[in-house]
Amino acid sequence: MMKVYSLLVEHLRKWGVTHVFGIPGKSISPLMLECEARGIEFVLTRHEAGAGFMAGGYAMTHQTLGVAIGTSGPGGTNMLTAAGQAKAYNMPVLFITGQPSIRDSGKALGQDSSPFTTDLVKMFEPVTVFSARIEREDLVARYLQHAVEQALTGVRGPVHLCIPFDILMADIEPFDLPLPESHRRVVSPDVEAVIPLLEQAQRPVLFIGKGVLAAEACDEVRAIAERWRIPVICTPGGKGAFPTRHPLCLGNFGLGGTEQARSYLKSGVDLMLAIGTKLSDMTLSGFTEDMAPKQIVHFDYDLTFVGKSIAAPTLAIPGDAKLNLQMLIQKAGASRVQAPDEIGIPFTNEAAYIAASTAPVEAGTSQTAASADTGSCMSAVTAVQALRKALPDDAVLFGDDGSHSFYAIRHYDIREAGTFYFDDVFGAMGHAIGYSIGASIGAPDKPIVCLTGDGCAMMHGNEISTAVNHQVPVIIVVLNNGRLDMVDKGMSYLTGRSVGAIYAHPLDVVQYAQSMGADAHCCRTEADIISSVQEALGTKKPAVIEVMVDPLEIPPILTRLLSLDDEQGEDAQGGE
């Protein structure tokens, strides 16, 4: 016989989990003790949301299950946002929460998680792909098996198990569950119908989202782009899926989008291949009726939103994007070819791309405002470009939610596919801090960087302390302009004034980071950023780089607001 908590930890160890993340509490303390006994490092985070974020980043780079543990009641509710973010990223994270003993259910209990008070199982249901309470010890094996199958197969995502204390401490017969393979079961029978559409198209476009990154389909997208010479536009979340200097890349559309992408969509697209994107309002920010293609082919596992965002005939290709694209390549004999220098789109080489990508955009969406005296602050555009100069090609950048990342979407070059991650749908502020720390723990030899803002740092910057305590070599870059920039600029544009978005006492990021033991630098010039990043890369310790940026600079986000001008009665929301 074995204790349930011992069997759970033994399976985590066997499945290749080297770290779990969380905050101790009575109902889950046996798990922490057993992790230490079996050689799994318990990472003490500063907030349960941070534990969930780190588990997501760890799962992403370590290519295994991420595990976040929170105690009953508020320990579990604190992880709900992290579960929602993991679901948006399709990250296989196992959230384990505690509960007082099941035999005491119905009594008045402190931090109860049962249906009598704070029912964590029901709370986790909308933000996971599976949520359940194990109420008998003989169900442990079955529920655990089902949870990891749901997390790792088909449409991957977070799962939740609530385990009462007496179940966790129960003795049961040992069992052995292998980690399920990541089965991609669904291949559409309509893939072959895409080939004649591609052959006949005169002005096609590939419109790719973060689902391409989740499906690990970057190579397949590139093969199709090069075989049929199709220009590529990325959504904000798809930014990292295609090299920005590739001759076929038109940059991004939506928030942070480029003029090249906008102009091409206006030029009469006859076929759009939308891959791994829901075509959300963030993605289609600035999209007008004259941009609608004649035909859409939409590759996505989830058909909930297919055919609902753009008024055009749509052929749905359900299933795993990678397998469906591989099938398309196979059926068409479309092995990847080298893209030629001349491809008949708005630019044809690297120099032309650089010139086009830095061209001024139209009035109302300008990159930089005519600023008043802002002291020794620098442009966020320059800051992002300096960061790119300082980082190696394979550095992985996690963009947090805020205007800082939309500067990166517009101006940060992707030199290798799969080195930029940003979520433009769920969008939890501060999540990238935890994701970058977890990702660095999962891949300690890879340069991992977080690009965040002072607003995000106010929410989850305390996890810098976690990185210091565990000597995680992550670089956290904070663009500091003393405000919630997207809210401030959005409100100001729509109403002429801003309320509640500017800090009376701005965050001193350097003092904040140093108080937690981190190496910290304050940068006001491009040279400062480059030297600080190079120093951080050489130390292999956590480092925080504060960049003082112009508070009056206008980020590339106003297309979302401009699209609201003609909508009477719509609430004005600028985002965070």
Image (spheres, helix red, strand yellow):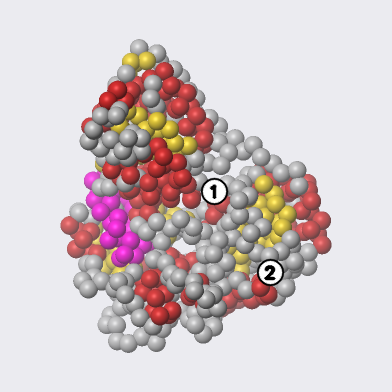
Residue 360 lies, in percent from the top left, at 52, 82
User: Which is more N-terminal, label 2 or label 1?
Assistant: 1
349 displayed left or right of 137: right
Image location of residue 552, percent across then percent down: 35, 80
Residue at 46%, 45% in the rendered image: 126
- Which image quarter holds the N terminus? top left
Q: In this view, does 322 lie to the left or right of 157?
A: right
Q: Is residue 296 left or right of residue 131?
A: right
Which residue is pictured at 38% across the width and 25% down the height?
Answer: 135
Residue annotated with mark 2: 292
Q: How far across and how far down the image is residue 16, in percent?
A: 42, 32
| SS at mark 2 in the image | loop
Q: Which amino acid does label 1 sit on?
A: Ala
* Camera-nearest label, 1 or 2: 2
Q: Residue at x 75, y 51 (%)?
A: 334
Q: What stretch is highlighted in magenta?
A: 451-476
Residue 349 in the magenta stretch? The answer is no
Q: State how far apart marks 1 and 2 are (Cα).
A: 26 Å
How crowded pointer 2 is (Cα within 10 Å; few <14, some 14-19, many 20+) is rated as some
Q: Mark 1 points at which residue?
A: 214
| Viewer can see residue 65 | no
